Amino acid sequence: DAKTTQPNSMESNEEEPVHLPCNHSTISGTDYIHWYRQLPSQGPEYVIHGLTSNVNNRMASLAIAEDRKSSTLILHRATLRDAAVYYCILEPMDSNYQLIWGAGTKLIIKP
Amino acid sequence: DAGVIQSPRHEVTEMGQEVTLRCKPISGHDYLFWYRQTMMRGLELLIYFNNNVPIDDSGMPEDRFSAKMPNASFSTLKIQPSEPRDSAVYFCASSGIVGLAGGNTGELFFGEGSRLTVL
């Protein structure tokens, strides 16, 4: 199974952009890339997903490398409420809706 | 919409007891997923339903675990008998946007989870 690799933790200053990297060098051409985040004592929350092209929504942007072996979640202006564990997840197209969750990156926002 | 509702939020029980976790998905969602989260193994998919029918239960750890969805607004995950290694946070999630042609789970909406401690 394709896997993802993320830094264990990252720090950023409030009101600055945050770039969260994810490596998925064994990704196949039909694997979707999902990002979820989990705030303390809460369930995971959907952030964004994509396949090949970069994606934008109200929460974040997803930049996917041309070879698809890595991607970056971009929070344009971090707030204290963005402090969470961010998961980069692959969904193989033939996986029967199985999401392959990694260990995630704990994002710390400094005021 | 109130979102996905799970109960109980916390459950402490003794080994050998039966545990029932409950979930009410978002109205109109036709997919329901049960996940388990532990420090050691992270998030694991246990089972999922489509239109109240179990589709894939390959993640259910053993016969002590069972899940039902008697109608579109209610699902249960039962552990009988419970063991200390079942201690975890159990999440229910629902989705109404599941992809076509075998891909793209779309957006999952998770509940706040049920934290189970088996002594």
Image: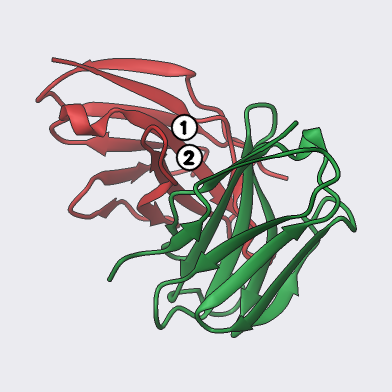
| Residue A41 in the image, given as x and y percentages of width and height | 42, 36
Quarter of the rendering occupied by the N terminus of chain A: top right
Q: Secondary structure at mark 1?
A: strand
The amino acid sitting under disc 2 is Cys
Pick the front one: B49 or B112: B112
Judging by the rendered image, the residue that carries numbered circle 2 is A88
Q: Is residue A6 above or below residue B59?
A: above
Decide which of tag 1 and tag 2 comes sooner along the chain: 1
What hue does chain A carry in this figure?
red
Pick the front one: A30 or B4: B4
Neighbourhood count class around disc 1 (C-alpha, 10 Å): few under 14, some 14–19, many 20 upward = many
| Residue B99 in the image, given as x and y percentages of width and height | 50, 74
Asked if the residue under mark 2 is in contact with the one under mark 1, i.e. CB atoms within 8 Å, the reply is yes
| Residue B63 in the image, given as x and y percentages of width and height | 90, 58
| Residue A49 in the image, given as x and y percentages of width and height | 40, 54
Judging by the rendered image, the residue that carries numbered circle 1 is A22
What hue does chain B carry in this figure?
green
